[in-house]
Amino acid sequence: MAKGDKNVSWNVFFAQTLNASAREPVFTVSQASDHINHFGVICNLGLLCASGTRTLADFFQAAIGPDGKCYICNSGGFSWVPSRGTMMPGAPEPHEYIGGSIQRVDLANGKVETLFDKCGEHPLKGPNDLVFDKYGGLWFSDLGKRRARDMDVGAFYYIKPGGKEIVEGVFGMLPANGIGLSPDENTVYVAETPTARLWAFDLSAPGTVKPRDVIYRGERGKPIAGLGGYQMFDSLAVEACGNICVATLISGCISVIAPDGTIVEQVPTGDRVTTNIAFGGPELKTAYITLSGKGELIAMDWARPGLALNFLNK
């Protein structure tokens, strides 16, 4: 299969290892998409690419569930817009957008199944990030889509243990991106992208956001941090001590925020499109960070251990 073949169909695959700290880690490769992502020629020359040759990528986030299968946030697709020497996600053309969904991949045979593409009567627009609680329930955010003249309001949802029922956590975020759980799993943290706010939502039971007094216009959570200047939040991970590490756009760093909202530090990454962070390696003290502007995954030593994820490294 050649990238210059005009007649080839392209899909997204991912490689996974469950023993990353071993001397010789073992990887499995599985198909992550249940649809063709691109047909024909592809190009990796950035701004030198001809129109229509860089539409291969979709945005995916993945987590291992209690059944050992891989659960995926499928955003439904993006278009790509040149910006300062790199490519940035933009609104998909109507014919390219397949709608958002939560999918499950059987790592043993590569089978892909779509679990949910709506909650009640409301379609999922662009699922973005996800995390399992210790009961096997799945929290995930829905960033939605931004178009030329309007954008979706974001939300986050909960798929109950067993994967048969989905409920709405909170709707009305601007919009919802990274999502994570506190070490005691009594709080859900959600990062809003354009506002660069980190919200905390107390839980009264697994999958249930605790009612609270409205701050201004219907909020059900508490904003614990907001960055000044022109910065935006993307995906996040949580440290074992409870700090929340949020990939921060434009300034190009990881913002480390204490549960009380104190900014502990901002760790520079050298890429203004820093989009995600996860922990692995010995004692979970290696941070794996996606530099989307450069198209790189980097690893760096981290000052504090990350929080072990249920069903993966706990």
Image: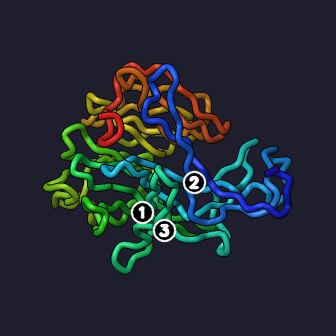
Say which quadrant the C terminus sits in.
top left
Q: Is mark 3 on a helix, strand or loop?
A: loop
For image coordinates 57% across by 29% down, the residue present is: 298
Residue 286 percent location from the top left of the image: 44, 24
Q: Where is residue 133 in the image (x, y as percent from the top left)?
A: 26, 48
Say which residue label 1 marks: 154
Q: Nearer the viewer, residue 279 or 151?
A: 279
Residue that badge 2 annotates? 31
CA distance separating discs 3 and 2? 22 Å
* The disc label shown at residue 125, or none: 3
Q: Check disc 1 and give the amino acid type.
A: Gly
Position of 18 compared to 55: left or right? Answer: left
Q: Nearer the viewer, residue 196 or 217?
A: 196
| Mark 3 / mark 2, whichever is N-terminal | 2
As shown in the figure, which amino acid type bears the numbered disc 3?
A: Lys
Q: Where is residue 170 in the image (x, y as percent from the top left)?
A: 30, 63
Callout 2 amino acid: Gln
Q: Earlier in the sequence, mark 1 or mark 3?
A: 3
Q: How far apart are marks 1 and 3 (CA)?
A: 9 Å
From the viewer's perspective, is the residue at label 2 or at label 1 nearer? 2
- Compared to residue 304, the image places residue 147 above or below, namely below
Quick one: label 1, few (<14), some, or many (20+) residues within 10 Å?
many
In front: label 3 or label 2? 2
Q: Give left or right: position of 80 versus 61.
A: right
Q: Which residue is drawn at 19% across and 55% down?
A: 206
Question: The residue tagged with tag 2: helix, strand or loop?
Answer: strand
Q: Residues within 10 Å of mark 2 (few under 14, many from 20)?
A: some
Q: On screen, 140 above or below 281?
A: below
User: For residue 139, which quarter of the picture?
Assistant: bottom left
Q: Can residue 89 be seen in this snapshot? A: yes
